[in-house]
Amino acid sequence: MNKLSMSGNLSRRTFLQVSAAGVVTASSLGTLGRAVAEPYSKFTWISPRGTLEVLDDYPYWIGKKMGYFDDLGVETDMQPGPSDGTATVKFVDVGQADMGFPSPGVFSFALENGMKLKSAFHMGAKDTFSLAFRKGEGTNDLKTLEGKTILLGSAAWQSIVDPMLAVQGVDVSKVKYVEAGWPTWATALKAGQGDAALGWEGLRAEWIGTGLDFEYWLGVQHSPLFANTFVVRAADLEDPDRKAFLDKYLRAWAMGLEFGYQNPRAAVEAVFEQFPTLASNIGPELGVTSILQQINVFRGDMDKRAGWGDHDMAAWQTFFDEIHKLGQISSPVKAEDVCSNACIEAANDFDHDKVKADADAYELTEAFAAIDVEKVKAGLYAQAVPG
C-alpha cells in the first residue's frame, strides 16, 4: 500500500473549499473568519477525535462544574467535530471554531497548508502517543516495523507517527499505513489486520474497558517528542480584546488541570456525570487509570515549565526540524513564530491554594472514594513492553 499523503497538491483556495464542505459555503470563506463579534459572542473549542465522550478533556468538565468558566461573559462550547483528523485545525482556520486541539503533526499540516494559526497553550508536555501490539508481538526496537503495517483511525494520523518513528531511527518510507477508521482501528489490530496501531495515554485504559488487551511501546517512556496543543488564529493573539479573553479562558483550563492533579478521582466523576455511557463502559477504576495517564502527559516536568501550557521552544524546534527533514513540511519553521507563551503567565495567575482547597473539599461518591490512587499509579505502565 502506498503511504498516505498529508499535504497533497491542493492549492490553498481549493483546500479551503474542500475542507469546509458541508459546513460553510465556498462563497462565505472570505468573511467567515472575521464574522465573530468582538471579542467573541460565543467561544467554541473543537475536539481532534470526532467525539467528546473521552476523559482527555477533564480540565474543562471539572472546571465547568467548579465554576471556573463562569466569569468569561460569553457562552463556551465544546464540539466533537467530524472524525476527519484534520478538522480541528480546518474549523479554527475558517472561523467555524475558535480553538482546536491538534497533535503536533496535524498542527504542522495546518502550517504547511497556509493556515494562520498559532499554538497558544501546550497541553501535552510529554509524548502521549504509543504503538499497540497484539500480546507477545510487542517490541521496543521500532526499526523492526520497517516493512510492516501500522493501523490508523484517520489518514491524518500519519503525521503523528512518522516523526515518532523517525526520531527512533526508523526509515519511514518502509512503513505501510492503513486507515482502519474511527473507532475500529483497534479492533482491526486485534483481528490481525495489521502489525501495530497508534494509541495514546488515557485511551489505553479505555481500550481495556472494551476488552482490547494489547501491549505497548510507550512514547511517554521513550520519546523525546510531545503531544497535542491548543491552537487559535494568530490574529486573535494580536487583538488586545481577544487576547485578554484567551488569557481568562485558558486560566479556567489551567485551574481545571490543577484541580485534576490535586484530586484525579473527582475530575473523573465530573466527566462521568457528563457522559454516562462512558462511565458505564469503563467504570471508576479504569477511569482513574486513564486520567492519571493523561495527567502525566499534561504536567510533564513541571519544575522546568513556567506553568500549565508552557511551550518548550527548544523541543518544538527539534520537532519542526525533524519533520522538515521528513518532508512533512516543505519549508523550515521557527518555533517562536508559530508557538506563543504570551498567555501562559496570565493563565497560571490564579489562586492555587483555593483550587487545592476546592479539590480537597470535594465529596467523592462511595465508588470513587474506595479507589486507592497510589495503587493505580503503581500499575500505570503494566502494559508496556518490557525492557
Image (cartoon, grey):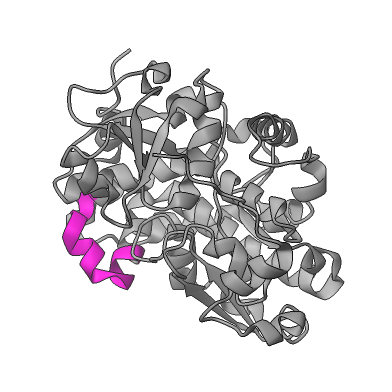
In the image: residue 326, left or right of residue 331: left
Q: Quadrant of the N terminus?
A: top left
Of the pair 54 and 349, the residue shown nearer to us: 54
> Which residue lies at the image location 67% right of the left edge and 69% below the top edge?
14
Camera-nearest residue between 205 and 63 = 205
Q: In this image, 280 relative to 138: left or right?
A: left
Q: Is residue 201 visible?
A: no
Q: Is residue 84 above or below residue 138?
A: below
The percent position of residue 337, horizontal first and vertical second, equals 82, 47
What residue is drawn where x is 45% and y is 48%?
A: 262
x then y, percent, for residue 147: 37, 24
Quadrant location of residue 58? Answer: bottom left
Q: How many marks?
A: 0
| Residue 188 image offset from top left, x and y in percent | 22, 46
Residue 260 x, y percent position in the rendering: 44, 52
Name the residue rendered at 38%, 58% in the picture: 267
Magenta residues, dominant SS class: helix
Residues 108 and 264: in front is: 108
Instruction: Locate the C terminus by quadrant.
Output: top left
Nearest to the observer: residue 230 or residue 245: 230
Residue lying furthest top in this view?
387
- Is residue 282 a member of the stretch shown in magenta? yes
Q: Name which residue lies at 48% across and 45% down.
A: 4
Q: Which residues are magenta?
A: 271-286
